[in-house]
Image: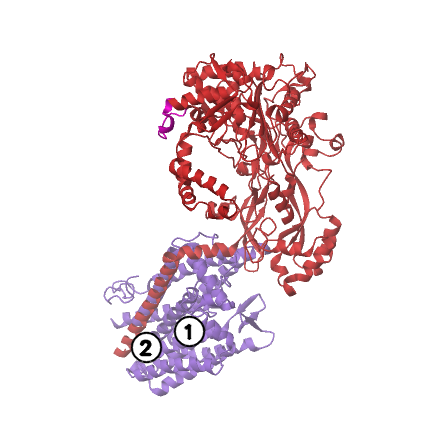
Amino acid sequence: MTSIFPTKSSDAAVAPSRDRGGGYFRDLDWILIIAALGASLMGSVLVWSASRADLAAEGDPQSYLKRHLINLGVALVLGVIATRINYRWLRAYTPVVYVASMLLLLVPFVPGLGVTIAGARAWIDVPVGLTIQPSEFAKITVILMMAALLAEPRDIEQEPSGRDVLYALGITAIPTAIILVQNDTGTVLIMGAVVISIIAVAGVRTRWLVGLIGGAALGILAAIQVGLLRQYQVERLTSFINPDDDLSASAYNANQARIAIGGGGLDGYGLFQGPQTQGNFVPVNESDFVFTVVGEEFGFIGSALLIALLAVVLFRAVMIAWKADDMYGRLVATGVAAWFGFQMFENIGMTLGIMPITGIPLPFVSAGGTSMMATWMAIGLLQTVRLHSLAVFRSQV
Amino acid sequence: MSQRSNVRLLVLGVLLVSLVMTLVGRLYYLQVVTGEEYKTAAVNNTVREVVEPAVRGLVLDQAGRPLVANRTSLVITVDKVVLEREPENGAEVVERLGEILDIPAERIADRLKPCGSEGAKPPPVCWNGSPYQPIPIAQDVDPQIALTLMEQGQLYPGVDARLDAIREYPAPFNVNAAHILGYLGPVTEQQLQEQGSTDAYDRLRRTDVVGRSGLEAYYDDDIRGKPGVTTLAVDTAGRVTGTLESFPPQPGDYLVSSIDANLQAVVEEQLVRAVQRAQRQGYPGDSGAAVVVDVTNGQILAMASYPTYDPSIWVGGVTKKQFDKLMDSGSLASNATQGLFAPGSTYKVISTVAAAKEGFNLGGAYACPSRVRLGTQVFRNYESSAYGRISLRRALEVSCNTVFYGLADQMWDKAGGDDAGRDAPDPIAEAARQFGLGAGTGIDLPVESVGRVASREFKAENWELKRDTWCKNAIEGYPETRKTDPELADYFTALDQENCADGFRWREGDALNASIGQGDTAVTPLQMAMVYAAIANGGTVYEPKLVKAIVSADGQQVREIPSVASNEITGARAQRAIRFLQDTLPGVTTNGSAREPFAGFPLSQIPVASKTGSAQVTGDKVSTSWFASYAPANNPRYAVVMMVTQGGTGSKASAPSVRKIYEEIFGIRGTDVDPKRSVLIGGEPMTDLPVIRPDGTPVVPLGKDSGVPEAREEGEDVVASGARENGRGS
């Protein structure tokens, strides 16, 4: 990865070839698919390695891997379906999807259906042995809703008004509030970054943008001050600053994660050989702390490869946004790129001790069916934007 | 789309690039730059070692009888970490423990203090191991008591019982051999430091017990074995998640000693008899040593030191009182290898070799007056006897000092007398060094004394060391002594004035004294035994060895310890002198100073070559009784040396005991010689090594040759279990 922004003329992958006719398969962004698939497959190996030690005593050490691969299969199918969604139809029905998603977000509060994991009541217990985390889907619907709202006047080259921004914030505020009540701080932070990115790219006035970023910062500070964030949430957020001094639970996580990754060295211990990973020293290392597995067992070489794959995904997403035919497509692609980018930074950053510890998964890599499905649906949406852009481009030529 | 949107998207893109770069940079720092330290952290985190101590190898005598074996003992341990969580650091628990174990509570408290901590008693009372490991406080505990402790666990937090393999001493023939066998102790801080940082599984651990003296220490690496170590991967909750490495324990190798338990017991008994003999003559007879060595290879068949101690006193640690008593008694060090004594007349063999090398006629006649006067000093013959002109052979037989004074005087003159430099020839000292005196013998024990050879060189070196003190005293004139005894002060001052001025000079008197093994010369009894062994075998000075072979615990691998000659006495004159001594020394027994103690001994069948010695000691002390010998003189096999300090003459105290030792070796009753009666099975040291069965039990001689009471042979395998009837109380 040398540059995320090559010149337009050299971008042969996105620029349609005039003598080649269009076509669904030919027009798909295969580089994006291959990179995302590569990250997912690497993730499967990591999840396998992380989970087999825990499961060895319980019979089938591969059971977690099997479930993960099933999840990946379902996610890929959902991704393919997403590419087949009619672009206009999608835009038109976004509010409906949004409302449905918000209702889904409330389900975990229903007694008997909700499940609390790691202090966050954000999961729905599905009888077939799965748990669904509606906030993962909410990320997509918020992106779609924001794009629909902010792109509405944009097609006629107008910047969004202050009222548009307020509407957009209102759209975000509802799921944010619900997710905050569910104690899923990480998702709130990511959602905030995504929303600000979308609003920025939508072209709002700079003072709106500055005010927004300043307001978000103040909001976090105020939340800490007035105790809206509970003590453990603050602890989780601040323990990364000086993990060696503090051996509380969250600092322990940070320490163990760094020991695992640091110990991996240049080329790692090898698959199934990482002492931290196999000794279960790093908590939830098949989901939130999955990066410690690649760090320990495959070293710097393996970790850099995984980051490179994810960077390629980000690059292609930004390029799709860049090439998007209309503002709606651009904002959808921007939202997805920001989502993947910030979530990846936060997730990997927390294992490296440069970001606070929050409970969010690493896109494509972490175990967790909902996250996997949501990310692959987002890949499908990126393809839809691209397919639409190429079709429009071709019709214009 | 608007320019602003494009710029914003570009900014977002750049932001994402920088985020990715941040991650890669941080990753590089963590993994490549500082990776190593995390690696160590990871290992500490996840690895727990379970150590199973190896069974320490046995020490067998030359016939396969165990001298050192193992047995199991019920040991009560206290986990200090748990105990200190109790009120007042668990003082009440210690009190209760003392009561049930019938040990004073203070003794338990002393035991629980880590060595070097505040108020800790010196080792071995204090705890020398890690404070995080259970500390043994009592052993050989009645199983009933241990059961009570376990049942009432809540009353005894941190208290546990376990079975330990500990050393035991089967003591065939009631043999002691404490100084040879040595004892065990916790590994020292120094040993751990010398080992450096290693993670080899068989490294020394703080909890290890190692040989601290004797064969246990010298051959520690061989007989310690390798511990069984299982390295477990452990998760945060302490659950075992896997086995990383596993090494089974490897029992230590067995030492096959050249010591014969039966002969050793005889020698020990005869040494005590010699001491008693001296004491019956009214002499203090305060210490002694005896050595029996095979002159053909340097193997030691028996070696005893008086006083001695019970080696089992060390098992499981001694009390402070026991330790102090041991230190005061002077029984810890072996007089045979660490004691330094003037050799007296036994040294005359050295002077004889020196004289021969200087060209003196071994067959010539020399004057043996009753005294020799040198200025104001008078050098007397023993009991001032005068023999007139006698042969050198006769001079040795009757131990005439004045003949050797004459020889020494001529050699001293020839070298330049008073004015000779420190490098001038010193034939007697040179001969002494060729026979291994003034240097370590190379015995397979961790410590031995090297001794001193009185010589021109030694005197010069000594003067350089002490000159400053002498000169200071000469000027000050002993003001303290002068207050009470001005005459003595004058005498001391005069002495130091002389010493200060020319204390480096090798005076005529020094030369005379040196020729008869007096003055500065000091030897160990072992050194003297090796001298006589070398005369017996024609001039080979062997390194004495206590161990013949090292055999693996299953008896499969055998490593024999080769005999090593540290020097060969060569040269025609020296060889002639040795042959002369071989011809002459039997005459000492038949016709000389040792005639009386060997009266009635079948010397025609077993001729004994010998030399008596009655070494003068400074002060008012009684002379040291020496008897050095080898036999059979016509076909030498054994050299036997015995000495008793303040024991009187060699012939009176030591010689009768040496005679008895020969009688036991050769199977002599009256004048009848029968090798079948020998304490050595087959009449001589075994050529074959004892057989060790695959299960680790050695094949031992049966019946009276076993050295253990009959009752113990029934029912259980004495060797394997090592059960000891007269077991010690806890």
In front of the other: B78 or B574: B574
- For the rendered model, the colour scheme is by chain
Up-down relation of residue B50 to residue B373 (above or below) = below
Q: Quadrant of residue B148?
A: bottom right
The label on residue B265 is none
**In contact (CB < 8 Å): disc 1 and disc 2:** no
The reply to whether residue B650 is in sight is yes
User: Does residue B457 appear left or right of residue B381 in this picture?
Assistant: left
Q: Position of residue B122 (x, y in %)?
A: 58, 51
- Secondary structure at numbered mark 2: helix
Q: Say which chain tag 1 marks.
A: A
State the residue in front, A187 or B510: B510
Q: CA distance from mark 1 to mark 2?
A: 17 Å
In the rendered image of the structure, the colour used to display chain B is: red
Tell me the quadrant of the picture where the N terminus of chain B can be found. bottom left
Which residue is disc 1 drawn over? Answer: A190
User: What are the residue bounds of the magenta stretch?
Assistant: B414-426
Residue B87: x and y in percent read: 65, 65
Chain A shade = purple
Residue B253 sits in quarter: top right
Q: Along the polypeptide, which appears first: circle 1 or circle 2?
A: 1
Q: Position of residue A197 (x, y in %)?
A: 35, 76
Q: Is B595 situated left or right of B474 in this image?
A: right
Mark 2 surroundings within 10 Å by alpha-carbon count, few (fewer than 14), some (14 through 19), many (20 or more):
many
Sort mark 1 into few (<14), some (14-19) or many (20+) by Cα contacts within 10 Å.
Answer: many
Number of numbered markers: 2
